[in-house]
Image (tube, rainbow, N blue to C red):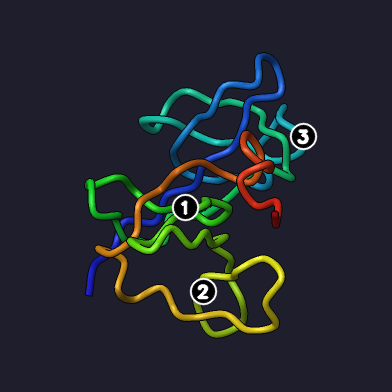
Amino acid sequence: MNREILFRGKRLDNGEWVFGDLMTKYPHHEGLTIVEHGCVYYKVDPKTVGQYTGLKDKNGVEIYEGDIVQDELGEVFLVEYVRFGYVLKQIGEPWCRFLYEYDEYEVIGNIHDNPELLEVE
């Protein structure tokens, strides 16, 4: 099984999202660094780093840890990683579900840019 291992994080210098390999130690770069296309290095905010789940939503959008997704019924979930894999956590509920029927979901934002999407009415 081959799956692409990618990360994303928000750049410290301008707040833009970058996608690529994650480096925790690199000469002259302290903290976390995302490497785009194997040669461009960006320091990123560690709180924003999330890994690609290897899955895409119903529109073909890559699903990352920290994304907020919505199902066909309008229910909203946060994509999280726990010991045994990626799960969908519904705010206000004590349970979660596995992210396997991913083509039923649509990425509508992420916890860092759109936390208001998770507010319970």
Q: Are dots 2 and 1 in contact, CB under 8 Å?
A: no
Residue extending farthest to the right is 30
The answer for how far apart the CA atoms under marks 2 and 3 are is 31 Å
Q: List the residue tagged with mark 2.
A: 87
Please give the label number shown on residue 30.
3
Classify residue 32 by image quadrant: top right
User: Does label 3 or label 1 sit earlier along the sequence?
Assistant: 3
Q: Position of residue 45 (x, y in %)?
A: 72, 35
Q: Residues within 10 Å of mark 3 (few under 14, many from 20)?
A: few
Q: Position of residue 118 (x, y in %)?
A: 65, 52
Q: Of the residues shown, which amino acid type is indicated by label 1?
A: Tyr
Please give the label number shown on residue 76.
none
User: Does label 2 or label 1 sit earlier along the sequence?
Assistant: 1
User: Does label 2 or label 3 sit earlier along the sequence?
Assistant: 3
Q: Of the residues shown, which amino acid type is indicated by label 3?
A: Glu
Residue 22 in the figure: left or right of residue 6: right
Q: List the residue tagged with mark 1.
A: 64
Q: Element type at marker 1?
A: strand
- Residue under the image location 36 percent in, 30 percent down: 37
Q: Nearer the viewer, residue 2 or 83?
A: 83
Q: Of the residues shown, which amino acid type is indicated by label 2?
A: Val
Residue 39 in the figure: left or right of residue 59: right
